[in-house]
Image (spheres, rainbow, N blue to C red):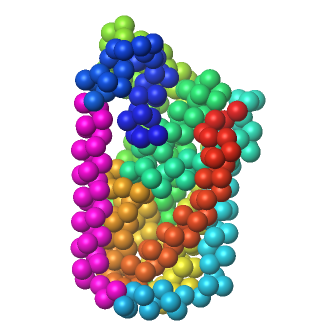
Amino acid sequence: MTLVDLLRRFEEFLGVRPVPDGPGPGDPTSSTHRSEAVRHRVKLGLRAAISIGLLAWVISGLDLSTVGAVLQRANLWLVPVIFALVIVERLLASLRWYLLVRSDSRVTYWRITRLLFTTTFAGFFFPGTVGVELLRVYSLGRGISNLALAFSSVLIERIQALTALALLTLVALTSAPPGMPPEIGPTAWIGLAALVLGTAMLLWQPFRGFSFRLLPGLSLAPLREQLAKVYGCLDLYRQQPGPMAFGLLVALAFQILRILQVVVGAWALGIDTPVQYFFAIMPVIILLTLLPISIAAGLGVREAAFVHLFGLVGMPADAAFSLSIFVYVISFAAGLPGAWMYARSGLKLA
């Protein structure tokens, strides 16, 4: 499924675009479909160019024989540890999402886990995180016939995850050794403030009224109806401060596990860098890989960020590049259960 296909199905699910019964505007041979496909190919080409360009820039400054030497001396006994950390991280992500949707009796933890593993595996082939989140909303919403709950749960889950990243960065900066890039602290504060402000805006009635006015006309009535239901779900979450606080704690544990995977990867490769640096720098790298500007889950962006940011604190470029590739390959391998689940049942929740 391409991103264009996903967006088309998502619009059909919203009721904004009718499903065609025969040749017409939605037919694959129509000019509308062709123009969308062309735009998709252009965007994909630009993202591929960015990924290839960044990879070429990083590799041009490396001695590949040194990179190979770093990878060859890896302590393979630590690979299962990283693999286990990835699996537990995804089980925690499933728990966090399940806590947000368990109000619907049709949702079980196993079904959420299956959906998260399949969409996470698909995420290795999507540009950035937007397509993956849409896939999760569409798949869950279709499975339980409750698009508003699916959308609001993914939105709150993303807010909790980003808040946890910002908090971890700020805590790490208080104990980090000298030499930390000075721009990380202000960026973390700005990000945290933006998350708080954005969440407050979603709960502010004048903003909600304005958002409805941005969707005028009869054709957008289904979208306004779904948006009203989303706001209703957000209000229900606001009335549950205890579960929301627990969800944030789970999100903190989730992000800690993501960072520990890289820490253990550094140990496996014999890289001697203070742990505090990882907790301050990895949230920035994670955020950069979420941007829809590259292909295959941040390919190129991730490697460039590893080399540049860890280089600022003294990690050799060949070691930083090797660490990025090493952890990514293990993470991809840990996503193969999602491929197996997809092969068995696709992205259907029920």
Q: Main secondary structure of the magenta part?
A: helix
- Specify whether 300 is left or right of 274: left
Residue 271 to residue 120: above or below: below
Residue 169 screen position, x and y as percent: 45, 66
Relative to 136, 298 lies left or right: left
Residue drawn at x 33%, y 64% is 301
- The magenta span reads 35-64
Instruction: Tell me, yes or no, whether the highlighted magenta stretch contains residue 32.
Output: no
Q: Quadrant of residue 143?
A: top right
How many numbered marks appear? 0
Instruction: Indicate the quadrant where residue 210 lies.
Output: top left
Whether residue 192 appears in this view of the structure is no
| Residue 39 belongs to magenta span | yes
Rendered location of residue 304, percent (x, y):
32, 71
Residue 31 is left or right of residue 270, and the answer is: left
Q: Residue at x 63, y 70 (%)?
A: 83
| Near-viewer residue (263 or 161) | 263
Instruction: Return the residue found at the far top.
Output: 218
Please say whether residue 20 is visible from this viewpoint: yes
Along the line of sight, the residue nearer the viewer: 65 or 210:
65
Looking at the image, is 211 positioned above or below residue 129?
above
Question: What percent of the width, then of the height, locates residue 197?
Answer: 39, 42
Q: Is residue 218 above or below residue 139?
A: above
Name the quadrant of the C terminus.
Answer: top right
Could you tell me which residue is drawn at 34 percent across and 14 percent down?
24
Q: Which residue is drawn at 64% across and 47% down?
A: 343
* Residue 311, x across and y down, in percent: 33, 81
Quick one: 97 or 35, which is closer to the camera?
35
Foreground pick, 189 / 264: 264
